Amino acid sequence: MIPCVLTVAGSDSGGGAGIQADLKTMLAFGVHGMSVITAVTAQNSLGVQGAWELPVAAVRAQYRSVVDDIGVQAVKTGMLASAELVEAVAELISGTDAPAVVDPVGVSKHGDPLLAASALDSVRRKLLPAATVATPNLDEVAQLTGVRVESEDDLRRAAAAVLEYGPRWVLIKGGHLAGDAVDLLTDGSAEHWLRAPRHDNRHTHGTGCTLASAIASGLAKGQSVPEAVTAAKEYVTGAIAAGFALGAGIGPVDHGWRFRG
């Protein structure tokens, strides 16, 4: 049986992030990708021109349709937009016997808000406690905890602040810091520092979605959290290096970089 991974996230009409990036990543990892669409965006390389969230009933129906018939070996969440959607999805993944990777998406690569400010408390109280792994970037750490990371030394403090909300593991993504791209994965006791060279390429649209989906794919195949995160970091580093221009703004990472000889 091919492992099945479910992404619960928004649609990116430009194909660089969201559901589209998730499914491409899952294909690259050899798992069967399935989707629950939470919102539709009008989005391109320049930014997000519009976003429309789906009703909670539509999100629940998609989720139950897939999980009750096909089953799932891992779930990944992305853009959830509102407090109502956050709480509904948290309830759904809490009742599913599969690891959950929570990417607490707050803003797009271009700085466009993708989560209502009123939903932050729901992310803290409901969604993060349901996560096997939470994968916030530094802006999302600040948004959720108030901790501002200025240097690598601050990553431990950021991780501790997020872990207080209840995820089993947290991956603090330090890609916005200067120097090498360094991330910290920890469950509060074990620490795994992941380093990669920083590639001089501005076409990085979809990195967060891609990383979280890659982690979920590894977990679905039975890898441990550190194994899945290490493989995901390697994959997304290659995808960033191969990121390409698309439109007039920031292009996407290349999800198929391993297939291009």
Image (spheres, rainbow, N blue to C red):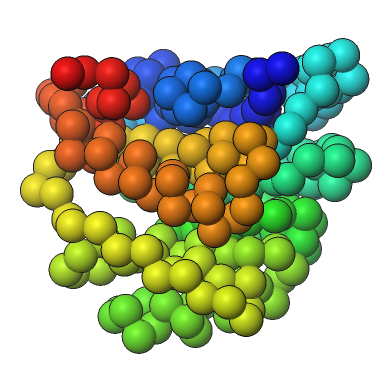
Measuring 60% from the left and 55% from the top, which residue is drawn there? 225
Question: Is residue 193 in sight in this rendering?
Answer: yes
Measuring 74% from the left and 68% from the top, which residue is drawn there? 166
Q: Nearer the viewer, residue 231 or 16?
A: 231
| Left or right position of 148 against 217 | left
Residue 203 quadrant: top left
Looking at this rendering, what residue extends furthest in the left direction?
200
Residue 244 quadrant: top left
Measuring 48% from the left and 28% from the top, which residue is drawn there? 29
Whole-percent x and y of residue 159?
53, 75
Q: Is residue 181 above or below residue 86?
A: below
Whole-percent x and y of residue 57?
84, 23
Whole-percent x and y of residue 49?
37, 26
| Left or right position of 162 against 55 | left
| Left or right position of 227 against 138 | right
Q: Nearer the viewer, residue 90 or 242?
A: 242
Q: Nearer the viewer, residue 249 or 161?
A: 161
Question: Is residue 53 in sight in this rendering?
Answer: no
Count of residue discs: 0
Measuring 35% from the left and 18% from the top, which residue is drawn there? 14
Whole-percent x and y of residue 126?
79, 56
Which image quadrant: the C terminus? Answer: top left
Q: Is residue 34 above or below residue 232?
A: above
| Left or right position of 6 against 78 | right
Which image quadrant: the N terminus? Answer: top right
